[in-house]
Amino acid sequence: SQKIEQNSEALNIQEGKTATLTCNYTNYSPAYLQWYRQDPGRGPVFLLLIRENEKEKRKERLKVTFDTTLKQSLFHITASQPADSATYLCALAHYGNNRLAFGKGNQVVVIP
Amino acid sequence: DGGITQSPKYLFRKEGQNVTLSCEQNLNHDAMYWYRQDPGQGLRLIYYSQIVNDFQKGDIAEGYSVSREKKESFPLTVTSAQKNPTAFYLCASSFSVDSNQPQHFGDGTRLSIL
């Protein structure tokens, strides 16, 4: 069955460092991968989308990579700030279909 | 401000009762979605709609029903047949369901059983 794995342990990181999160998937051939941010008691907010033929995407301090051979996406927050503390969700979709399959999310805590 | 409004924020249901969660969007999006989120779990798709008067079951549709009479509105009814309804319910929308685009989410309704 399809599986999307994100680290269940919270990532505690010092302010100013780079936070790196991993999203691994099995039995899935996604055409697109999206990353969302979710704060407690709120809905997810879209951050970045990367296609299967793209290796890397950047937006301000965020960077996403997508390796279809390793079946893995990495999400980086550079120069992390306490305001970056949240849970980050990865979501996958097939080509031509916006039905997203979500991972469980990975919490980031940025320590001042 | 364009966005998605979910109401109420908190909802309590008695045993054997149906309850309806509201979702309204003013983004002019064709596609709308309902998800359920449980602690430590990913979002799971309940129902989605590509266009008015059309909707499709997602992965966990049993015990739920929806309607899409207007483009802006996609209410979800949690019926008494849903034996474990306590969860955080999220509504989302996107321009269409045919191509991959960001989904815009509301701030959810937390449903609990009395």
Image (tube, rainbow, N blue to C red):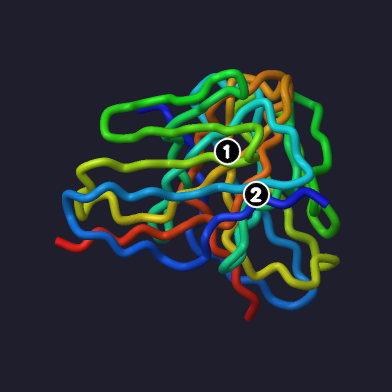
Q: Secondary structure at mark 2?
A: strand
Q: Is residue A105 left or right of residue A16?
A: right
Q: Nearer the viewer, residue B94 or A72?
A: A72
Which quadrant is the C terminus of chain B positioned in? bottom right
Q: Residues under labels 2 and 1: Cα distance? A: 8 Å
Q: Where does the image place residue B33, in percent across and percent down from the top left?
A: 66, 38
Q: Quadrant of residue A32?
A: top right
Marks 1 and 2: in contact by CB < 8 Å?
yes
Which quadrant is the N terminus of chain B positioned in? top left
Looking at marks 2 and 1 on the same chain, the residue that comes earlier in the sequence is marked by 2
Query: Looking at the rendered structure, which numbered label has been put on residue B35?
Result: 2
Q: Is residue B100 above or below residue A104?
A: above
Does residue B37 appear in the picture of this structure?
Answer: yes
Q: Quadrant of residue B47?
A: top right
Q: Is residue A85 left or right of residue B37?
A: left
Question: Label 2 sits on what residue type?
Answer: Tyr
Q: Residues within 10 Å of mark 1 (few under 14, many from 20)?
A: many
Q: Nearer the viewer, residue A23 or A34?
A: A23
Question: Label 1 sits on what residue type?
Answer: Ala
Q: Where does the image place residue A62, in percent across and percent down from the top left?
A: 33, 35
The residue that appears at 14% across and 61% down in the rendered structure is: A112
Discs 2 and 1 lie in a common subunit: yes
Q: Write down the residue under mark 1.
A: B92
Q: Secondary structure at mark 1?
A: strand
Q: Residues within 10 Å of mark 2 (few under 14, many from 20)?
A: many
